[in-house]
Image: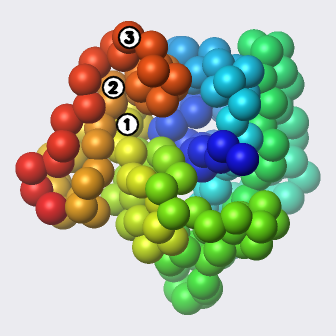
Amino acid sequence: MKLIILDRDGVINQDSDSFIKSPEEWEPIPGSLEAIARLYRAGYRVVVATNQSGLGRGLFDIIALNAIHQKMHAAVRAAGGIIDSIFFCPHTVGDNCDCRKPRQGMFNAISKRYDISLEGVPSVGDSLRDLQAGFLAGCRPILVMTGKGPLTHENGGLPPETIRFDNLAAVASHLLDTKAENVPEKNAKT
């Protein structure tokens, strides 16, 4: 089985420092929906793993989160793809849970649900905690330069063998062995 794990905010949709609290605030990053559709058509199971501490902070409720995810699912389907499943952590940093990235709890749950090792599975994120969680679970860390990606790259300290791309569309091109929109660059700061 081919699997890819994506962060949500800053990878699939525009990020916001004030959180995505409603379906109206959810806006896809140009090319991300088509990238998911390309991966799906190529046989990838696309899984989302996302921290959603806005739940724990009381900024939105589970009904709003479900509505946001329904909008995302519908937008991906309209582009010709499917997101197989969404894993989310509702906790805040103070909750000290195992599922909040940079911990690997959501990744362990993904491994268990699909009954596979995550060794070498591409894990795409725009923040250091996304990359760290995937790396700890054995995934291949991929940084996108959307969302918080530029700041994450600038700050350094990325997991070893992290590669970066401009966006999710470029990741899909690379994984599908088509002419990539840019060439992966090994991270000099490990």
- Work out whether 20 lies above or below 103: above
The C terminus sits in image quarter? bottom left
Tell me the residue that label 1 is attached to. 144
Q: Residues within 10 Å of mark 3 (few under 14, many from 20)?
A: few
Q: CA distance from mark 2 to mark 1?
A: 6 Å
Q: Residues within 10 Å of mark 1 (few under 14, many from 20)?
A: many
- Residue 36 is left or right of residue 120, and the answer is right
- Say if mark 2 contacts mark 1, CB within 8 Å: yes
Number of the label disc, if any, that sits on residue 179:
3
Residue ID at (65%, 19%): 38
Tell me the residue that label 2 is attached to. 166
Q: Picture quarter containing residue 100?
A: bottom right
Please, what is the three-letter code of the amino acid marked with disc 1? Answer: Val
Residue ID at (54%, 74%): 104
For the residue labelled by badge 1, is the local secondary structure a helix, a strand or a loop?
strand
Q: Picture quarter containing residue 128?
A: bottom left
The percent coordinates of residue 99 (x first, y second) are 63, 76
Q: CA distance from mark 3 to mark 2?
A: 14 Å
